[in-house]
Image (cartoon, rainbow, N blue to C red):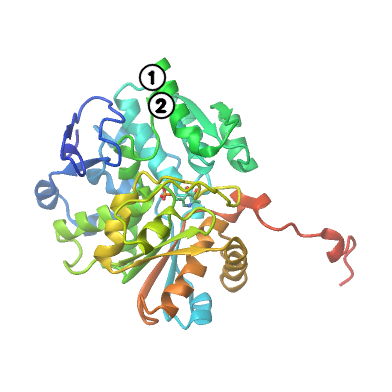
């Protein structure tokens, strides 16, 4: 398959077949990882020729796990702008603050990257039905790409799923089920359904290809910085997939010699105070997160009470000298307003946790104010309208007099 050499469970090293769809084969707490023949890629490709490629994540096709990029199930995902945000930066005294605006993706969030690559690869392998539990954004994305691919998608969503994600799921014809019970049970329900029906579990870190799609955020950040790495990445973390993926990309680029070897950017993880298993584990110096039992977050993402990528994320934070910061709901909402007001970028509240979290990281001297810092804006506020405080139209006035 393309330049793929092998697929291993990242910790146990157990190998995973390269041809043939397998899911959930790694031991609990571990996940499958794709390895490429980077020597051959280095010999056959030159990083600058990528600049003439398509304006989507498929510009990195040699580094993606597919038989043929012509098979891509694509809606034009990826190649999102890395925008300087000097006005927002000035409010913290940061001279080099940037935002990777993932809200530009087709479904409105970065989840499209994983959906495009995973659905492409699983369709190549003949998978006909995919199932997963999703707080909403991944469900919306998976439904759209499955519709385009002609694959059946079963989405298990929470009762407070936001209307944009719910509509994407239902209008795309996904078999949409709303969980009647605590969200912590959603993973077990999917596992039972997989056992009963033989459906393919495409959930976070169960199979290797969503990670491969999401790693393209890392390639893009490097390419957009003239093939260099920033000093810090601030990432709103749920299951951990996006953070793990971005750093996989950075390491591959270093091995390819396409960016300088050297310290990786500091990873600053942000979570909501009402679901902060990784922050708690980081503070306790633990190597894995305990189940978060008292889930209290806004409707939308960052609901992972037992993040499947916990160990790898905690390791990355420590290896890079980063940190993990919990953000209150009012601070996240205020930060979303601040970004919109100062920069004209309307982020979802999940991604606005990065803004509030960065402020704390700066105050704690985790990162310096002159560092090149990238906030990953994982989704658009347009996906999260009911999560924001409403605007009382009568306070504005029904008839305008200007
Ligand atoms: C908008 C948004 N941002 C970030 C995340 C975190 O996802 P992950 O940590 O799996 O990359 C999610 C999902 O929970 C999300 O919906």
Name the residue rendered at 56%, 59% in the picture. 347
| Image side of residue 179 versus residue 128, left or right | right
Q: Which mark is residue 191?
A: 2
Please provide percent x and percent y for residue 388: 67, 56
How crowded pointer 2 is (Cα within 10 Å; few <14, some 14-19, many 20+) is rated as: some
Please provide percent x and percent y for residue 199: 40, 21
Tell me: residue 294, above or below residue 126. Answer: below
> Which residue is nearer to you in this view: 16 or 104?
16
Please provide percent x and percent y for residue 181: 58, 33
Q: Is residue 129 visible?
A: no
Q: Is residue 393 visible?
A: yes
Q: Which mark is residue 24?
A: none
Residues tagged 2 and 1 counted as in contact (Cβ below 8 A): yes
Q: Quadrant of the C terminus?
A: bottom right
Tell me: residue 10, above or below residue 244. Answer: above
Label 2 to label 1: alpha-carbon separation = 6 Å
Mark 1 = which residue? 195
Q: Judging from the image, what secondary structure is the residue with disc 1 in?
A: helix
Name the residue rendered at 46%, 46% in the picture. 304
Tell me: residue 152, above or below residue 247. Answer: above
| Image side of residue 129 versus residue 352, left or right | left
- Point out the residue furthest to the top here: 197
Tally of marks: 2
């Amino acid at each position: 398959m393309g330049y793929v050499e092998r697929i291993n469970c990242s910790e146990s090293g157990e190998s995973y077949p390269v041809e043939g769809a397998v899911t959930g084969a790694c031991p609990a707490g571990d996940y499958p990882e794709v390895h490429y023949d980077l020597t051959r890629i280095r010999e056959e490709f030159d990083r600058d020729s990528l600049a003439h490629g398509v304006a989507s994540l498929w510009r990195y096709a040699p580094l993606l796990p597919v038989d043929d990029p012509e098979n891509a199930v694509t809606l034009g995902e990826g190649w999102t702008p890395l925008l300087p945000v000097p006005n927002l930066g000035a409010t913290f005294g940061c001279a080099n603050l940037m935002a990777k605006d993932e809200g530009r993706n087709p479904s409105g969030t970065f989840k499209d990257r994983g959906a495009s690559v995973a659905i492409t690869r699983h369709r190549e392998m003949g998978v006909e039905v995919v199932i997963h539990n999703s707080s909403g954004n991944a469900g919306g994305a998976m439904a759209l790409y499955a519709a385009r691919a002609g694959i059946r998608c079963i989405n298990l969503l929470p009762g407070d799923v936001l209307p944009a994600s719910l509509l994407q799921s239902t209008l795309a014809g996904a078999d949409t089920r709303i969980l009647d019970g605590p969200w912590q049970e959603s993973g077990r329900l999917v596992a039972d359904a997989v056992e009963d029906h033989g459906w393919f579990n495409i959930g976070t870190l169960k199979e290797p290809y969503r990670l491969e799609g999401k790693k393209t955020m890392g390639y893009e950040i490097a390419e957009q910085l003239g093939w260099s790495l920033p000093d810090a990445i601030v990432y709103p973390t749920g299951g951990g997939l996006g953070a793990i993926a971005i750093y996989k990309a950075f390491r591959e680029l270093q091995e390819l010699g396409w960016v300088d070897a050297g310290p990786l950017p500091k990873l600053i993880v942000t979570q909501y105070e009402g679901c902060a298993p990784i922050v708690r584990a980081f503070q306790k110096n633990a190597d894995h997160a305990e189940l978060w039992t008292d889930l209290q977050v806004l409707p939308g993402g960052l609901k992972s009470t037992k993040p499947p990528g916990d160990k790898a994320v905690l390791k990355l934070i420590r290896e890079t000298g980063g940190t993990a910061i919990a953000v209150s709901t009012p601070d996240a909402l205020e930060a979303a307003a601040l970004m919109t007001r100062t920069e004209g970028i309307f982020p979802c509240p999940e991604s606005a946790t990065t803004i509030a979290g960065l402020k704390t990281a700066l105050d704690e001297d985790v990162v310096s104010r002159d560092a090149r810092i990238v906030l990953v804006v994982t989704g658009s506020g347009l996906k999260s309208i009911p999560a924001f405080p409403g605007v009382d139209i009568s306070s504005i006035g029904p008839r305008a007099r200007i």
